[in-house]
Amino acid sequence: MGYFGAGKRLDDIGDGDLAALIAWRRGQTVWGRKTLKNGKPAPLVSAATVNRSTVDILRKLFTHAIKKWKIPLPNAPDWEQHSIEERGELVREIKAGAQEADIGASLGIGYRDLWRFAMASGLRLAECFLRWDQIDWEARTITVVQKGGRDHTVPLTRDMQAVLSACRGHHPEWVFCYVAQRTIKKDGMILRERGQRYPVTYEGMKTEWRRKVKTDLDLNLRFHDTRHTRASRLLRKTGNLKAVQRLLGHADIDTTARFYAHVMLDDVREALDRDDNPRQNSRRSRKA
């Protein structure tokens, strides 16, 4: 870690050093900028970013040194005491109807297919860049690699099948491909030829989302909100938190409950409203 310098030994790092590192990191702005593209002052990095880039990374290094290298580190910092409280992730949903239709209409060919697949599957963006060999048409399943390197198998639904079937024949290896709008050459070689299809990339999808959804449609939505939307809709329809956990691939159902507690609160509110209506009607009848 550059903050400590090459001469700093692990066994010299204690609570005071970690506290100083955290204070330094908390004073930094996102992307190290003073201002954003819109001219507004760049905000400070979030508590989550501070924790991931200080406490978490040092703790992993210390753990590795102790377990793998057998180095005794009796003065290791008290990690839990240094972690900054993080605000829970804000869960936004894409509104069914006009908003969902507008997003689909705004995205370009290939990008729209990938987004529709994400809406149907609930997969993370990084998990949506499918190769054809990941799809088992006979078993009606798709296997992806999730965070942490774990395999995750999801059922292939009719909506997902419809999206994937429409992409057949576009590329021999990759499922989702965009159509090049212009020819790009470099040193006399054609890198992209207008009208030809090329695999959608992670950065390409993020750029398309930022331009078409956040800028053109002026919607405060992230691509990841597609995953939240799918999970929230499934939970509202079935009330089955275990099914949502299975869909998302969460190892712990507590993680699912934490993110989607608002959906269950909605159900409680609706149940209470339904319970109130008969009472109100009963009071009106007695008055009559």
Image (cartoon, helix red, strand yellow):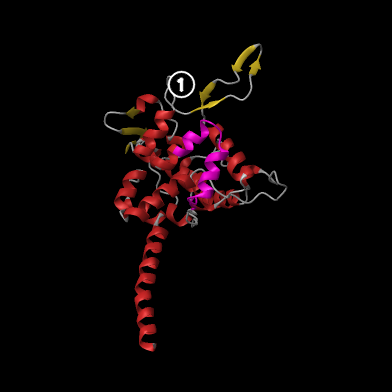
How crowded is the residue under tag 1: few (<14 C-alpha within 10 Å), some, or many (20+)? some
207 in magenta = no
> Circle 1 is placed at which residue position?
171
Q: Residue at x 46, y 38 (%)?
A: 116
Q: Is residue 5 visible?
A: no
105 in magenta = yes
Q: What is the x, y in percent for residue 186? A: 65, 16
Is residue 221 toward the left or the right of residue 265 in the image? right
Q: Splitting the image into 4 quarters, where does residue 214 fall?
A: top right
Front residue of 122/68: it is: 122
Identify the secondary structure beneath mark 1.
loop
Position of 86 relative to 35 (above/below): below
Quarter of the image for the C terminus: give it.
bottom left
Q: Residue at x 47, y 34 (%)?
A: 114
Q: Residue at x 35, y 87 (%)?
A: 286
Q: Main secondary structure of the magenta part?
A: helix
Q: Splitting the image into 4 quarters, where does residue 182 fall?
A: top right
Q: Is residue 64 visible?
A: yes
Q: What is the x, y in percent for residue 146? A: 38, 37
Position of 192 relative to 46 (above/below): above
Q: What is the x, y in percent for residue 75? A: 43, 49
Residue ranking furthest to the right: 39
Front residue of 96/119: it is: 96
Tally of marks: 1
Residue ranking furthest to the front: 288
Q: Amino acid at mark 1?
A: His
Is residue 88 toward the left or the right of residue 38 in the image? left
Magenta span: 92-116
Q: What is the x, y in percent for residue 124? A: 44, 40
Residue ranking furthest to the top: 188
Front residue of 31/67: it is: 31
